[in-house]
Image (tube, grey):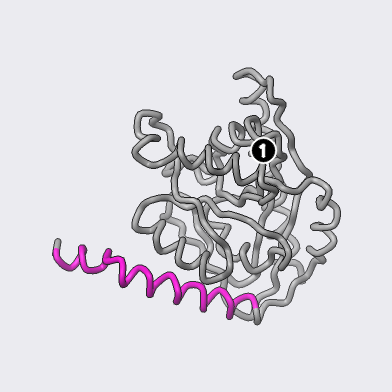
Amino acid sequence: MSALKKFGRSKFLLTLGGKAIAAYLRLVHATARYVNDYQSDYKQVSGHFPAIISLWHGQHFMVPLVRQDYHDVRALVSRSGDGHLNAVAANSLGVKVVRGSGGRNRAKILSKGGIAALKTLVTTLKDNISVVMTVNVPKGGARECGMGVIMLAKLSGRPIIPAAYASSRRITMEKAWDLASINLPFSRASFIIGAPIYVDHESDEDEMEAKRLEVEAALNAVTKKAYEQAEKR
């Protein structure tokens, strides 16, 4: 069983899997009927780029396909085996990645590349390139925003822009920690972009916590709106 598990985690198979995921997501996008004008949403926030586009983990799969062609972004992807799968899928969809992640246990951030990734993302934003990242606490609550995105906004001076994608036909992974949704072809779909949220460079811990809760509430709001629009007949 251990050999089989190791084989299933091989880089070769994960690479094939990532490319297969990208092909599937293209199919979903090509057959979707979008019920809102997300191009208009982009125009409303265009003056705030580069920005930190923030999403709930498990609801982020389709986002590379609804970005603007001219919109250069980097995606934060973990260093895990699953992260390699996601990195290949993102690259196949034209999005370059930064590897690293955080978590609740600060002692593990170094081994996960969190600090190095944070520095890289700050530099990326200063180079006028936006960042897209999921903001849930890894293995924590499905709708619990972590502090990493707040720290990035504070250090970079760039805004957090909450976003959400939803489709009318989907499979929800009820037992997954992030309640991930697998979007299905031939769906009504909605992509919602929220208002920018800035974090002052001088913010103390209390102010950062308030911003964390603000981002959490904003993400829940755009997610709710996306699903309501996608499911409306």
Residue found at x 74% / y 38%: 197
Q: Is residue 221 above or below residue 184?
A: above
Residue 138 is situated, as x and y percent measured from the top left of the image, at 44, 43
Examine the image and state in which quarter residue 107 appears.
top left
Report if residue 121 lies within the magenta region: no
Q: Quadrant of the N terminus?
A: bottom left
Q: What's the residue at 27%, 64% (across, down)?
A: 9
Kind of residue sitting beneath label 1: Val
Give the image quarter of residue 202: top right
Residue 211: % across, % down: 67, 30
Q: Report the side of 24 relative to 49 (left or right).
A: left
Camera-nearest residue between 170 and 218 = 218
In this rendering, the answer to whether 163 lies above or below 117 is: below
Q: Which residue is mark 1?
A: 215
Residue bounds of the magenta highlight: 3-29
Instruction: Name the secondary structure under disc 1.
Output: helix
Looking at the rendered image, the quarter that the C terminus falls into is: bottom right
User: In the shown orientation, is residue 42 left or right of residue 56?
Assistant: right
- Residue 124 at what x, y percent from top left? 61, 46
Q: Which corner quadrant of the image does residue 192 belong to?
A: bottom right
- Please tell me which residue is depicted at 55% across the width and 32% down the height of the picture: 147
Residue 29 % position (x, y):
64, 75
Q: Which SS type dominates the magenta stretch?
A: helix
Is 9 one of the magenta-colored residues? yes
CA neighbours of label 1 inside 10 A, class few (<14), some (14 to 19), many (20+): many
Tell me if 103 is positioned left or right of 13 in this view.
Answer: right
Query: Along the line of sight, which residue is nearer the eye, 176 or 127?
Result: 127
